Image (cartoon, rainbow, N blue to C red):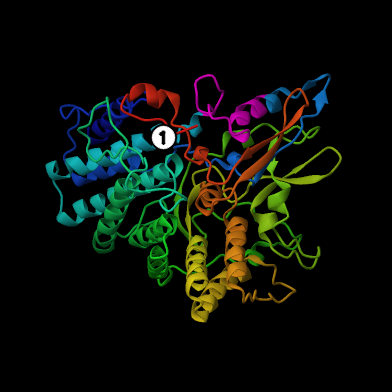
Amino acid sequence: MKKIFLCSLVLIMTLSISCKKFLEEYSQEEMRPGSTGDLTSLMNGDAYPNGVSIETFDVLTDDIQNNPLIQVNGAPIPTYLASLQAGTPMFTFNPTMFDQNNTISTSANVYTRLYTKIKGCNVIIDYLDNVSGTAKDKNAILGQCLFLRAYYYLRLVTLYGQMYNGAGVNPETALGVPLVLSSQVKDGGLPRNSLKEVYDQVEKDLLRAEPLLRANFTPTNVFRVSADLCNALLSRFYLYKGRNEDMDRTIQYATATLQNKFILTSLAGFVGSNNAISPNGIYNAASPEVLWIYSGSYSDINTVNFDNRSLPPFTVSADLSNQYDKGTGTSNYGDLRYQYYFQSFTTASGTKFPYRTAKNTVNATYGTKGFRVAELYLNRAEAYARRFLVSGNTTDRTAALADLNTLRQSRYDTRNTVYTPVNITDAQALYTFCKEERRRELALEDCHRFIDLKRWGMGVTHIYTGPDNVTSTFTLPPNSPLFALPIPYDVMLANTGLIQNPR
């Protein structure tokens, strides 16, 4: 009976959430979980992001290029044409990219999908006092939900708001996203909170979650969050906040996690006798550097069926490919990330192209997104480099280089060649190298490049060839208002209190 009750409960709650009414109030008469075990089952389904496809918006960045479609019997390959049309609004920086008249993928409506998960967190938090169970179990649930809510809000505010330290941005007046902190909220005129209010709430939730998780919850696998992961997200949070004073905290919280979780995967260990790279991806439960995995799917524009008569309409850009040291061949493959982090596509003529990410696979064992130790080395290195730019303190320079070289040594083919450490003395050159290394390591992963371009004040230029074979150039200028993504049209219809981002 208990299993039947739980299934019915989850079904009721799932059906009560729709894209149009994602803030609809839960009826307290419909849910009667009796224990912390019931709430844990509900949390695992409704608060954790498992099974939710969340767009990474790589097509907005310089990591993706558009390829002209080869005409076959006088027309483009149908599956490729559909993929081209789906990716065109974002690739061409169309301000109406999320409007009803565009064939955008459902996974691009990150706004609705994340608020649905926030609602799940709020329901569980609100109901904790109504169930039986130990204080330890309740605190474990509370810590997980606070972390997850903070994670979702950080994603929302960095996508739909300007950056906290952006050029000309006043965080106290700039628009963030609506803060919904209770399940007792109905549809209607929910206004957008300021950037400062949203960032303050993310910080508050994470600082509260870490000691709760540390004292009450030890995850049994990488599919559940932890206190170390909480500190890792705090390092990302302060790096994104971006002020000079936030660099100290970026270093502090990255170090707090790296004291316990510091191992990086040696990619050289994955090279077989035939120089083939292991297909399992770096996001798998066996990887020593994975802090958290959650499942989802690839970006829809990169899931078309292969037809080797033509390159797919969107692939890894030549600009990104050229960032990697490809080595000399059979005895030294240089930076193994070029081979290991991308799936290859081979045309009928035998030409190979990097196609999409190979960091993950979609099945029960290996997730598609998450958080890795590698990011912590990069967060800390960038913060040290920023401090070196400001103060000229050579200790910060040495620390930044140590983190960069620790990461890079694990990525190079060291079977037959000794890794040569990077040694940069100029402060600006070191900061630039940190940015480049971050791009190489985090390519096509969890919105990193889009957010990095946004917070660094960098622009993007795309060359686009339409189905009519006409080529055009589209540019997203540095600090463009469009870096705060348009709120999807269905959300604007459902919530009359929202103000749309400038287009």
The residue stretch that appears in magenta: 82-105
Residue 19 visible in rendering: no
Q: At 33% from the left edge and 61% from the top edge, which residue is drawn?
A: 227
Give the percent coordinates (x, y) of residue 53: 48, 37
Give the percent coordinates (x, y) of residue 156: 40, 42
Front position in the image: 24 or 294: 24
Is 147 on the left or on the right of 304, as rendered? left
What residue sits right under mark 1 in the picture? 111
Q: Residues within 10 Å of mark 1 (few under 14, many from 20)?
A: many
**In the picture, residue 432 is in which quadrant?**
bottom right
- Above or below, 208 relative to 132: below
**In the picture, residue 46 is in which quadrant?**
top left
Magenta span has 103? yes
Front position in the image: 324 or 125: 324
Q: Secondary structure at mark 1?
A: helix
Give the percent coordinates (x, y) of residue 439: 60, 56
Magenta span has 459? no
Q: Outermost residue toward the right? A: 349
Residue 484 visible in rendering: yes
Q: What quarter of the picture does the N terminus occupy?
A: top left
Is 212 on the left or on the right of 57, as rendered? left
Is 6 on the left or on the right of 250, as rendered? left
Indicate the amino acid at tag 1: Tyr
Front position in the image: 487 or 164: 164
Q: At 73% from the left edge and 62% from the top edge, which residue is drawn?
A: 325
Give the percent coordinates (x, y) of residue 121: 28, 42
